[in-house]
Image (spheres, rainbow, N blue to C red):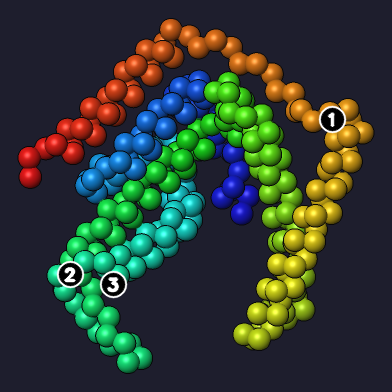
């Protein structure tokens, strides 16, 4: 769990980690926008493959990359299934389930794969960005982009205390497991309910303790974040070369004759 959510890879020294976080965020935003507005699955898949290859190039374990992609893959599967059986008119397969006849359509499958490729492409961009940029630099860059201070401060606190709650959740689950709380289906459901309720209660307690601690340290409604240095000439060159390059590749892929 530590490796799954930590910034350990963002603290390594390589070409991508040395790049200014604002430059990386502008490039990532450009790539996400082009992925979302793609009308074909090829460009999002290209973005997904490129970003996954980038994470592997950073020597991230294959198992860790797959773990980070498990949830997006589940979303993709749901999208494909729902679109296949709820939209379209050209049947390609059908079967009966509890008296219901389900028909998968060609148009639905194509649309589901397009939506799924967009999800994979956009998520892979964010995963690569988080793998080469520490969280505190991302929050600092968001302030530089004039994102409302309240949003940034809430995001910073959520990020900080997510790990605290994860540790507490792991401790409670371990204690339940030792007491055979997950030995049967009934006990598992009961233990999961107790675990969820306990974590919610502890999150409320943690919020109060955090606010009191911040108030004692002089918090007056604003978290101080130091200003960032001016972007250098090479940073601007990177932005004006890479971002238009991404848009150009996107347009070429979208308009390429079928």
Q: Position of residue 157 (x, y in %)?
A: 71, 40
Residues at badges 1 and 3 in contact (C-beta under 8 Å)? no
Point out which mark residue 165 bears.
none
* Quadrant (top left, top right, bottom left, bottom right) of the N terminus: bottom right
Left or right of residue 98: residue 5 = right
Residue shown at 74%/23% (left/top)? 224
Per the model, the C-alpha gap separating discs 1 and 3 is 53 Å
Residue shown at 34%/43% (left/top)? 36
161 or 167, which is in the foreground?
Answer: 161
Mark 1 is surrounded, within 10 Å at the Cα level, by few (under 14), some (14 to 19) or many (20 or more) other residues, namely few
Residue designated by label 2: 89
Q: Position of residue 17 (x, y in %)?
A: 50, 27
Residue designated by label 3: 85
Residue shown at 36%/36% (left/top)? 33
Q: Quadrant of residue 99?
A: bottom left
Left or right of residue 47: residue 153 = right
Residue designated by label 1: 219
Q: Quadrant of residue 95?
A: bottom left
Per the model, the C-alpha gap separating discs 2 and 3 is 10 Å
Which of pointers 2 and 3 indicates the residue nearer the eye?
Answer: 2
């Amino acid at each position: 769990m530590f490796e799954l959510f930590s910034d350990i890879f963002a603290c390594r020294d390589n070409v991508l980690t040395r790049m200014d976080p604002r430059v990386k965020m502008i490039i990532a935003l450009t790539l996400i926008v082009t992925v979302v507005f793609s009308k074909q699955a090829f460009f999002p898949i290209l973005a997904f493959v490129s970003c996954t290859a980038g994470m592997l190039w950073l020597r991230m374990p294959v198992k860790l990359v797959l773990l980070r992609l498990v949830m997006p893959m589940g979303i993709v599967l749901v999208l494909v299934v729902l679109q296949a059986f709820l939209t379209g008119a050209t049947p390609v397969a059908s079967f009966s389930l509890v008296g219901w006849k389900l028909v998968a359509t060609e148009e639905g499958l194509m649309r589901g794969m397009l939506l799924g490729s967009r999800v994979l492409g956009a998520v892979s961009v964010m995963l690569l960005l988080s793998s080469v940029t520490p969280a505190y630099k991302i929050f600092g860059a968001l302030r530089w982009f004039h994102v409302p201070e309240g949003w940034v401060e809430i995001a910073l606190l959520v990020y900080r205390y997510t790990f605290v709650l994860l540790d507490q959740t792991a401790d409670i689950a371990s204690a339940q497991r030792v007491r055979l709380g997950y030995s049967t289906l009934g006990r598992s459901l009961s233990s999961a309910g107790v675990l969820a309720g306990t974590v919610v209660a502890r999150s409320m307690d943690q919020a109060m303790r955090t606010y009191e601690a911040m108030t004692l340290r002089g918090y007056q409604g604003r978290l101080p974040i130091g200003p960032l240095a001016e972007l250098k000439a090479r940073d601007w060159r990177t932005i004006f070369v890479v971002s238009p390059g991404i848009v150009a590749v996107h347009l070429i892929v979208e308009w390429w004759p079928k």
